[in-house]
Image: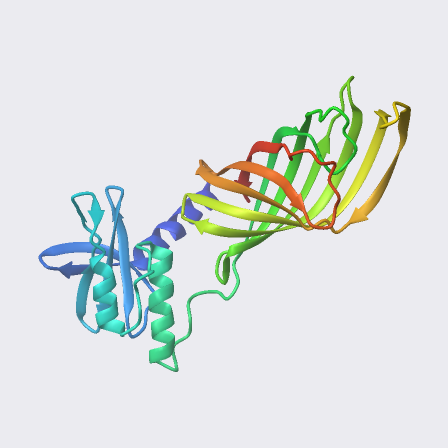
Amino acid sequence: MKRLLLVLAIFVVQITFSQQTYSIQGENLSLYAEADGTLTLLWNSFEGNYRYFIKKGEVITELKNTKLEGAYQEEYKTVLQNYTGNEASKLKFTKSDLKNYIDTYNAAADSTYVSQIPSVNLKTRLGGFAGMTNYPYFVNPENTVLPQIGIDFEIIDEIKLKRHSMQFQFRQIFGNKDYDFSSSQLSLNYRFKFVKWETFDVFVNTKIADYVYISQDIDVIENNGDTTNIKGSGGDFQAPFALGIGADIALGNGYITLLYQDIVALNLTDNGEFPIDFAIGYKWKL
């Protein structure tokens, strides 16, 4: 109990000293300081709404993004450009983006300033998915659609490479009584997020390397009417460079994931059927 009280006391002290009260246009506001230097970003959340301020010397100016007739006015961009002389047209009104912008300015304006932004910030996500596929990169006489399940493990650098990630995937395709085919696949993938918002990403997935283990017992009718049986099992390493598309939608402590996988594979020969490879899942932020 004493240890718990000590931890709580230290936590309260840290919160208290990390905030400072400022008098701004008649308001007394308790604010946090970020990227403290030539310019300092001040911020806090009031009743669920974030407010941001820029401080230079003793002058404090609020950064605003008011909404008028359904459109955001983005006044904060003009204020920051006037302070820094740097382009701010693509700057988002979020704490992380504002902090990065001011940190970059401080580093250029003062050679003694020590950047407060880490050079690398690796984040990981782990999730599972389920869906259906006709796996067109193998013999499939009736174009049968089979169930699949899988696991994703994604690595992201939130600082330098926000739009890029590496992903390891295991998926299992199950056969049925009409199409005795199953496949276990372990792959390395690269994802480029061409749409990246705080709550929504859309990405292109490139399957770079893949180990595929297949088990099959399939009867194939040849052009002359003869039937050939393909039976056996085995594995192989591949470099398919298969392209797919997907989306992550923020929900809770993670993301709903929508996948359309292996639409085309540059180094694999398909069976002529249109690819059906859809899945939906959920991934958690670790």
In the image, residue 196 above or below residue 250: below
Q: Residue at 77% across / 26% down in the picture?
A: 141
Q: Residue 222's quadrant in the figure?
A: top right
Q: Is residue 111 left or right of residue 23?
A: right
Horizontal and vertical percent for residue 144? 71, 24
Q: Position of residue 236 (x, y in %)?
A: 83, 45
- State the image quarter where residue 149 is shown: top right
Location of the C terminus by quadrant is top right
The structure's colour scheme is rainbow
Residue 192 placement (x, y as % from top left): 54, 53
Residue lying at 35% horizontally and 62% vertically, measured from the top left: 99
- Tell me what residue is drawn at x 36 percent, y 59 percent: 97
Q: Residue at x 17, y 69 (%)?
A: 59
Q: Nearer the viewer, residue 2 or 27?
A: 27
Residue, far bottom: 111
- Residue 35 makes an appearance in the image: no
| 250 versus 159 height, above or below | above
Q: Nearer the viewer, residue 168 or 29?
A: 168
Q: Is residue 75 above or below residue 113?
A: above
Q: How many marks?
A: 0
Which residue reaches farthest front? 224
